[in-house]
Amino acid sequence: MTRWGPGAAILAALLAGCPGGGGGGDAPRVLVYARGQDSVKLDPADITDGESAKVTACIFDTLVRFQSESTEVEPSLATSWETSEDGLSWTFHLREGVRFHDDTGLDAEAVVWSFRRQMDPAHPARAPEATFQYWADMFGDVVQVEALDPRTVRFTLSRPSAPFLANLAMFSAAVASPRAWEVHGAAGFATHPVGTGPFRFVEWRPGERIALEGFAGHWEGPPRADRLVFKPVSDNRVRLELLRKGDVDIMDGLDPVDLAGVRQDAGLRVVEQPGMNVAYLAFNNQRPPLDDPRVRRALAHCIDKASIVENLYFDTAVPAVNPMPPIVWGHADDLEDRRLDLDEALRLLDEVLPGRPALTLDVMSNARPYMPEPPKLAIYLQRQFEKVGVRCEVREHDWPSFLQLTENGEHQLCLMGWIGDNGDPDNFLHVLLDASNARKGTASNVSFYTGEEVHRLLDEARGLRDERARAALYQDAQRLIHRDCPMVPLVHATQVVVVRKGVEGLRLHPTGQTRFKDVYTVP
Amino acid sequence: MGSVERRALRRLGRMPSAWAGGLLVGCFLAVAAAAPALAPHDPVRGDERERLTPPGVGGHPLGTDALGNDVYSRVLHGARTSLAIGLASVALAAAVGIPLGAVAGYAGGRLDALLMRGVDVLLAFPGILLAISIMSVLGRSLGWLCLAVGVVGIPAFARQVRAGVLAERALDYVQAARALGARWPRLVFATILPNCLGPIIVLATLGLGSAVLEAAGLGFVGLGPEVGTPEWGSDISLNRNLFQAAPWAVVAPGVAIAAAVLGFNLLGDALRDVLDPRSS
């Protein structure tokens, strides 16, 4: 059950102000956002989970940011930037007059400090338990960050990195106030975050709520809501009921089966956004009989993605053709998908596997943002494969054991997914299908696909800066991947958020980070 | 059939609870035996496009579940799974528990203490918890499920039989058999055990009921037979988030579990009144 007690309800009522005081009076405009889990911590550089990032993205700004509905990069704390001929040096010019919530001014030293604490293990402002995992994953190529003058910052890279600019727009590249460290100490910062963002941190009662307050001094002007409260409510149904009662304004994590009822409810509104994710069926390409592309193609022909979308995702997804969603640039739009074709599957299988060996399909038992009910999807696939005589045993695992098992390559088939971080094709194709990520024990390429040509294309695209040239390489790679069929992309799940009637201006971003600055309520 | 048994049967026939229990158990056995013939649809090869069809529509007497499988057919086939688990696990519990209890009860002394402490260790775990731990280690499969539920049932048989043997072994007919030169295996299994059969039958009947319940419980928490197998507990678990949209997919297997367990309990209690008057 949820921890939403009567105290919290009274508090929410107080925060929401008197219901009769609408019409632009003095009552504070409060937004309450209900979600499945609480944040882990609020140091933007030292988190990896979406529930923490959702909050830090309100408190902090980054040098550059994603446009409000795409992963194209636009200016934020930096107004302009240039890069050297060799692509190894990036120079950013900072915006004038930006203030932190503690009323210190933003300068190049603060930016340098924010990045150095992540890259330098001996930095004084580094909490001993901090791991800064995203720094290693996304910024490993950075060798130096320095202030050229109070308004100019230069990054030096060890080798050209095409996704570098997009990485700087991610939540972990946030610019934090060095003075907050002096005030709260290394350990205190993760619970007292201070940035330049549109909302100021007020308080965090773990498991109960995180309260933020609109920052009047934000460089873009104050946000439209006075207060923003994040409230963890673990049960999907309870969260929906709170929204219906008006105790909260926004909720995420709706059960797809409840969507039809929500659409009919005049008091609620559904906000949707194509998700930057992919759910897929991975074949372990190194284990017979799945090392034969004909077997993999045959199994792909057994799957009806349209039916999966309609009947298992209740239309909150789109069928996937490629391992990355169409909203990511470089997506090969012209590829024609393998259709449901049991005759073709039978023909292929009879050719290679006259006696059909039994297969195993490993699956996680818990819901993921890209897969609301993994076991049901697994049973569907089991049923489809049986139609062509392939018996498939489904094995359910809890999430940590499932990850371990698939990273070690102990599976034959498994259901997997990926949520994009920065909107770069590299972040899908390289992570999911490059040979360098197919090492047993740490594999993110759980198809264990080691296609030479694809590896060469992905590597080459990494070193280029011209987006057009990169897109062409990625499209070639997707064609080869489609031919080899190392995995079957199933669907791209849609992000769904439900708001109370009267909540306006909410837009979901592909990365899952919502910009709450423009959200407001009308009575 | 001796006169004692005939009298017992006559008493049983006069008990309404025996009739009710017998009827439920009879239905359960008949359904389990004839499921493939009775079921109008294949329990696993439904069409997902027919998902959540309400009862009575499209040839589905109890509607369909989230994957378009016919709920009625799944409940019928689920009886099969439940009966298989029930019989196998009770057979296992009896096969291990009865000799264990009989030897302990007859031998007495240190061997008795040793065997019964082993049984006490098993008994120290709450049954379902023990079964959950066994299943978590071994992974889901029908065979392991029978094993897990069976192991949980061992202590009841062992203790019941030991108590019976202890009571019988001092009686004259046992002494007489021993005086005639019968060795201990013959004494225990051929002479004494047949006279302890009443309570064992009662226990086996009640044990079938609790085995069905435990198997459903394990299925509900995701430790049942292989994924996709029609099994009441797993079916409830798989469809429980659809309770508002499609209550039939949850209620039907739930009623089936309740009916089967009630049947075995009623019959078991009636049998106890007749066969084992001391304990009632």
Image: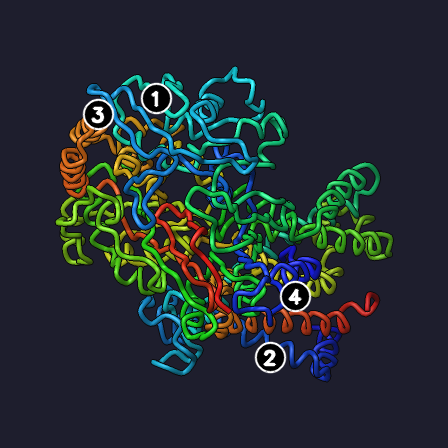
Q: Mark 4 points at which residue?
A: B205
Q: Name the residue under label 2.
A: B23
Q: Mark 1 points at which residue?
A: A155
Q: Mark 3 lies on which chain?
A: A
Return the x and y of residue A491 as percentages of the image width and height: 30, 53
**Element assignment for label 3:** helix
Q: Which image quarter: residue B207? A: bottom right
Do tags 3 and 1 sit on the same chain? yes
Q: Mark 3 points at which residue?
A: A463
Do tags 1 and 2 sit on the same chain? no
Labelled pair 4, 2 in contact (Cβ < 8 Å) = no
Badge nearest the viewer, 3 or 1: 1
**Badge 1: few (under 14), some or many (20 or more) residues near its Cα, within 10 Å?**
some
Badge nearest the viewer, 4 or 1: 1
Disc 1 marks which amino acid? Answer: Phe
Do tags 4 and 1 sit on the same chain? no
Return the x and y of residue B145 as percentages of the image width and height: 54, 52
Q: Which chain carries label 4?
A: B
- At a point 71% along the width and 47% down the height, the residue shown is B125
Labelled pair 2, 3 in contact (Cβ < 8 Å) = no
Return the x and y of residue A422 as percentages of the image width and height: 33, 39
